Image (tube, coloured by chain):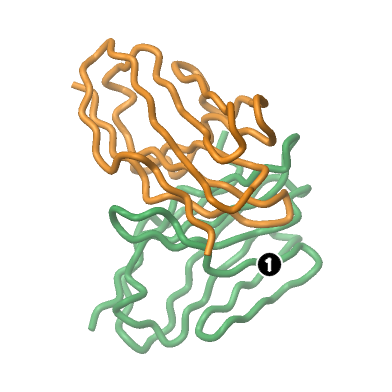
Amino acid sequence: DQQVKQNSPSLSVQEGRISILNCDYTNSMFDYFLWYKKYPAEGPTFLISISSIKDKNEDGRFTVFLNKSAKHLSLHIVPSQPGDSAVYFCAARGGTGNQFYFGTGTSLTVIP
Amino acid sequence: DVKVTQSSRYLVKRTGEKVFLECVQDMDHENMFWYRQDPGLGLRLIYFSYDVKMKEKGDIPEGYSVSREKKERFSLILESASTNQTSMYLCASSLDENYGYTFGSGTRLTVV
């Protein structure tokens, strides 16, 4: 059973506009969340994180919001740039080994 | 910068062959992981290891085994490759459970 879900497999946004990528999880014991970005033929690279004790974390153009009651997190990219075009994975930490569970990914295309 | 190196970018193997995927990290990380990435399924954990000679099953261990004889090296073994093991395989390492993962560039395995 998928404990972390990204229900939108793809998203297209105009350059300069906001990109919002969503992620839902089922386990209320998850305590740490990450977003990764992946280009084709490369491994995922860490983008931004948030602890369950916070509801927002910002790093430049990237902001992650966490709504614990809804078990939902989102990644906002403002302004979006063509170089942001990639697959984005959210990940949540928990479970017996404290490993990370990954979502299915959302492919973002930023149109120039 | 932590580097995680996977020995092959592309591999083509025949059904029934024994396949070894090698992963080496250079930052003395305790934890190492093997994932496979498939369209629509995201990243799924195959095996992980928290220490030398230690291994734990992930979500989809069937048909795979692993070896960690040295801290820096984590090998994934396909005992008898099958076509449904055609996938992108990603190795990752982390310092401990409080840190996110550093991924290798991946190995695209095709089993014919």
> What residue does disc 1 label?
A50
Residue depicted at x 40% and y 53% = A43
Across and down, in percent, residue A19 comes to 43, 76
How many numbered discs sit on the rendered protein? 1
Q: Quadrant of residue B40?
A: top left
Residue depicted at x 69% and y 34% = B51
> Callout 1: helix, strand or loop?
strand
Q: Quadrant of residue A31?
A: bottom right
Q: Which chain is orange?
A: B
Apparent side of residue A105 relative to residue B60 in the rendered image (left or right): left
Apparent side of residue B72 relative to residue A81 in the rendered image (left or right): right
Residue depicted at x 44% and y 63% = A37
Q: Which chain is green?
A: A
Between residues A76 and B88, which one lies in front from this camera angle? B88
Across and down, in percent, residue B31 comes to 64, 42
Look at the picture and state if A14 lies above or below B21.
Answer: below
Apparent side of residue A78 relative to residue B32 in the rendered image (left or right): left
Q: Quadrant of residue B77?
A: top left
Between residues B60 and B79, which one lies in front from this camera angle? B79
Q: Amino acid at mark 1?
A: Ile
Residue depicted at x 43% and y 82% = A18
Subunit under mark 1: A
Across and down, in percent, residue B53 comes to 65, 25
